[in-house]
Amino acid sequence: MSFVPPSLPKGLSEKPASPGIHLPPSTQPYERDVVLHHVGDQHPDEDHISNSDAHTEVNSDPERDAKYNLVTWDDNDPENPRNLSRFRKWTITLLSSALCLSVALGSSIVTGDIPGPMEEFKVSEEVVNLTVTLFVVGFGIGPLVFAPMSEILGRYPVYCISMGLYFIFTLPSALAPNIGCLIASRALAGIASSAPMTNVGGTLADIWDVEDRGAAMAVFSSSIFMGPCIGPLIGGFIGETIGWRWIYWVLFIFVGVVFAATVFFMPETLSPVLLRRRAARLRKETGDPTLKSESELHHVSLSEKVKISLTRPLILLATEPLLICMSGYLTFIYSLLYLFFFAYPLVLVPKGLNAGEIGLTFIGVMIGIFVAMFLLPLQEKAYRKVCSKRGVVPEARLPFMMFGSVLLPFGLFIFAWTSMRHVHWIGTAIAGIPFGAAMVAVYISANSYIIDTYQRYTASAVAAKTFLRSIVGATVPLWVNQMYAGMTPQWASTLLAFLAIAAMPIPFIFFYYGDKIRARSTKAN
């Protein structure tokens, strides 16, 4: 390649060895879920998290690529999201976490006053529970639409569209003249609100280097877990004092504030989109049609992206034992969390607690979440220790999950055998501490294990996990009351504890034999 004069536009170079500015590889297929656009020596699989692995279907064309000059980031490029100020990064992190908090809160806040709409609309509890079921189903359906949309439009427009629709569809819930309107608006709100739950992890990966990402991911994870726990607490007191409709009005106001903050303060952070815009600007300024970003060289049609987004997760979920087991365990944990929203009132109302007081007992789960977050540095220490012995392998992520799998049955047994009417309510609240800690330990560890194992197909693997978790978790409100009424709270919760014991060996099996299982897979690393 010839020497590039200093007068060339910023972000463009033909010098193959220049930092962060290079020609696309001509011998390797462009086959990644996690794409490198970052300046420096970061591992390519840890830099940029995509929302779709549609581009894994496209191979490079050396003859074609040689005709173009690749536009990418310069060293210390101010337009590179990785080079934002620390204050700006934390502003984006907190706003992204608020997005997830508003969505997670919306899934559970309505459980604070289920009897309210039952009495007003003269319907059964199971019918009102559909307001939770269909909202959670939306979590599994929405990403199938928003993931390919993010690849084309970027993260910022998708956040704005998602939160704008969430804001709009929450209003009919507050004004609903009948149960049909309430259920339909909740279903639409669930689908609309799903984008942040799948996009925010990618946003944090866009702006933070790997070694600095831990604290930001902890804040993000806390918002996901804290939202469902805060919901019954807030909803219970609102429903108890000013009525069930005000639960939706409060949610409507909160979502509106977060939506407005997103519109005015959230920047675009997805590197392929930013580089595509830069390339278009440079082509216009220079009149040189050979200036292209990497995503433009490896273009995939929207129809192909949608096809892959819809089919590959289901194929992985049907053919990958590792993904089946990990997704199944996460689905069990997720279902337990939603089960508690309905089981706590069944246990605590006979003890004399009202809806607001029942919400306060979820503080035990929150304490457990904070305990697990406090223990996260120990997980990192265990990760480095395993890597020093076995190399950098996905199984190094599992010790924290092993800890959580042992802790989970203890929380369920405590909940089961403190649920009798004559036992003080504090026992039920205490049971939430080991459950909350186990939930976070299992989720963070298993999620990292899935991502590390399916690096080329991360988007599809995560979508498969999310789809299964959401669909199964959404069914919980439809059968939990019958289960607890038929078996009594003690034995229903004891059954769940025994199921947790049966699932306990999963992380241990994969810790010791995961490498052999991965070796048999055509999709795993």
Image: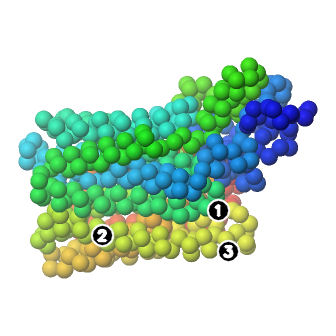
Q: Position of residue 247 (x, y in %)?
A: 20, 50
Residue displayed at 58% across by 59% down: 213
Q: Residue at x 36, y 46 (%)?
A: 258
From mark 1 to mark 3, how far is it between C-alphas?
A: 17 Å
**Residue 360 point in image, percent of width and height:** 24, 68
- SS at circle 1: helix
Callout 2: helix, strand or loop? helix
In this rendered view, identify the residue nearer to me: 165 or 281.
281
On the image, the x and y values in percent for residue 380 come to 60, 70
Q: Earlier in the sequence, mark 2 or mark 1?
A: 1
- Measured in 3D between alpha carbons, the distance from the residue under mark 3 to the one under mark 2, in whole angstroms, is 34 Å
Of callouts 1 and 3, which one flags the residue occurring earlier in the amino acid sequence? 1
Q: What residue type is disc 3 on?
A: Lys
The kind of residue on which mark 1 rests is Glu
Q: Quadrant of residue 281?
A: top right
Mark 1 in CB contact with mark 3 (< 8 angstroms): no
Indicate which label's residue lies in the foreground, 3 or 2.
2
| Residue for badge 3 | 385
Tell me what residue is drawn at x 36 percent, y 36 percent.
Answer: 164
Instruction: Please tell me which of labels 3 and 2 falls first in the chain.
Output: 2
Residue wearing tag 1: 211
Single out the residue that lies furthest toward the right. 2
Judge from the rendering whether residue 522 lies leftward or rightward of residue 125; answer left or right. right
The tag on residue 363 is 2
Q: CA distance from mark 2 to mark 1?
A: 32 Å
